[in-house]
Image (tube, grey):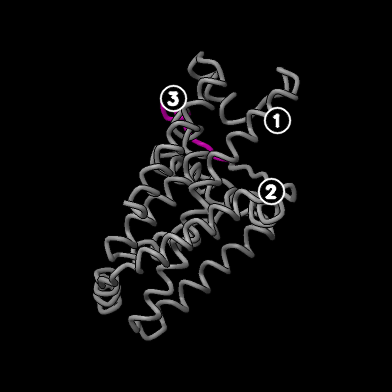
């Protein structure tokens, strides 16, 4: 009970968001990391981590069981699950991958600006803990341990105003990266799909197409519009 009390108190702490100039600088730095080919190549696996977490969360919320998650050397990933999901639940699971990084980025911007950056830290550690239970790759373990270690360091550190603001700045950088990472991976998806034979397409948009009888390009367009909307909303909160 004491641990739960301490956790709820920590979760309820309010830390004023960083100054707009610092937040915007960090945010657009994160965006540039997702744009530049060299940095994107090094960090794309982070976007995949959140992508597969989106599938996993949707799987659990629809009453199904995640069997394993793998992050591959080419920065792609796969989430395997089991259960008796119908078309609607299967569609939800397939849909939640590509928007997941952008949704996480939007939530991060909102929570830090509202003074609740601890919510973002708690969410990240919750995702990492769940990921640790089901992931089956060294890359996944490295990212999971990094998230848990950074989160634990943050929780154990004396919460001075400067430290809290610096963490908020870092979270804005992560948010900028994730918000741009989603649309970039969607554009990559479309480009890769067009090069593949029709009988060998197994992407999320192809799964949705088979489940709903709507063209895969429709789902890619919907992914893109939704993620760009989240990025626009998040960006406007920094510049207005």
Closer to viewer: mark 1 or mark 2: 1
- Magenta residues span 80-90
Residue 8 position within the rendered picture, expressed as x and y whole percent measured from the top left: 26, 70
Residue 48 position within the rendered picture, expressed as x and y whole percent measured from the top left: 60, 48
Q: Are marks 1 and 3 in contact (CB under 8 Å)?
A: no
Q: Are marks 3 and 2 in contact (CB under 8 Å)?
A: no
Q: Please give the name of the residue rendered at 55% of the width and 60% of the height, measured from the top-left corner.
A: 132
> Which of disc 2 and disc 1 is earlier in sequence?
2
Quarter residue 78 falls in: top right
Closer to viewer: mark 1 or mark 3: 1
Q: Quadrant of the N terminus?
A: bottom left
Q: Which residue is mark 1?
A: 192
Taking the magenta stretch, the answer to whether it contains residue 81 is yes
Q: Nearer the viewer, residue 217 or 208?
A: 217
Q: Which residue is mark 2?
A: 75
Label 2: few (<14), some (14–19) or many (≥20) C-alpha neighbours in 10 Å: some
Q: Which residue is mark 3?
A: 86
Quarter residue 195 falls in: top right
Helix, strand or loop at disc 1? helix
């Amino acid at each position: 009970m004491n641990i739960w009390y301490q956790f709820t108190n920590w979760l309820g702490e309010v830390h004023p968001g960083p100054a707009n100039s610092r937040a915007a600088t960090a945010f657009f730095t994160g965006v540039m990391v997702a744009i530049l080919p060299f940095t994107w190549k090094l960090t794309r696996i982070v976007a995949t981590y959140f992508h597969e977490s989106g599938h996993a969360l949707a799987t659990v919320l629809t009453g199904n069981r995640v069997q394993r998650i793998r992050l591959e050397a080419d920065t792609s990933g796969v989430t395997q699950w089991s259960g008796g999901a119908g078309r609607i639940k299967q569609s939800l699971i397939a849909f939640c991958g590509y928007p997941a990084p952008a949704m996480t980025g939007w939530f991060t911007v909102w929570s830090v600006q509202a003074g609740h950056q601890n919510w973002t830290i708690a969410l990240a550690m919750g995702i990492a803990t769940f990921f640790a239970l089901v992931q089956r790759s060294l890359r996944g373990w490295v990212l999971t341990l990094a998230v848990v270690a950074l989160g634990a360091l943050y929780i154990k550190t004396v919460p001075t105003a400067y430290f809290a603001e610096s963490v908020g700045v870092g979270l804005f950088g992560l948010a900028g990266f994730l918000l741009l990472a989603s649309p970039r991976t969607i554009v990559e998806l479309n480009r890769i799909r067009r090069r593949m034979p029709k009988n060998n397409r197994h992407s999320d948009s192809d799964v949705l197409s088979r489940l709903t009888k709507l063209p895969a390009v429709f789902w890619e367009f919907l992914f893109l519009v939704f993620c760009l909307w989240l990025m626009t909303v998040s960006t406007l909160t920094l510049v207005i």
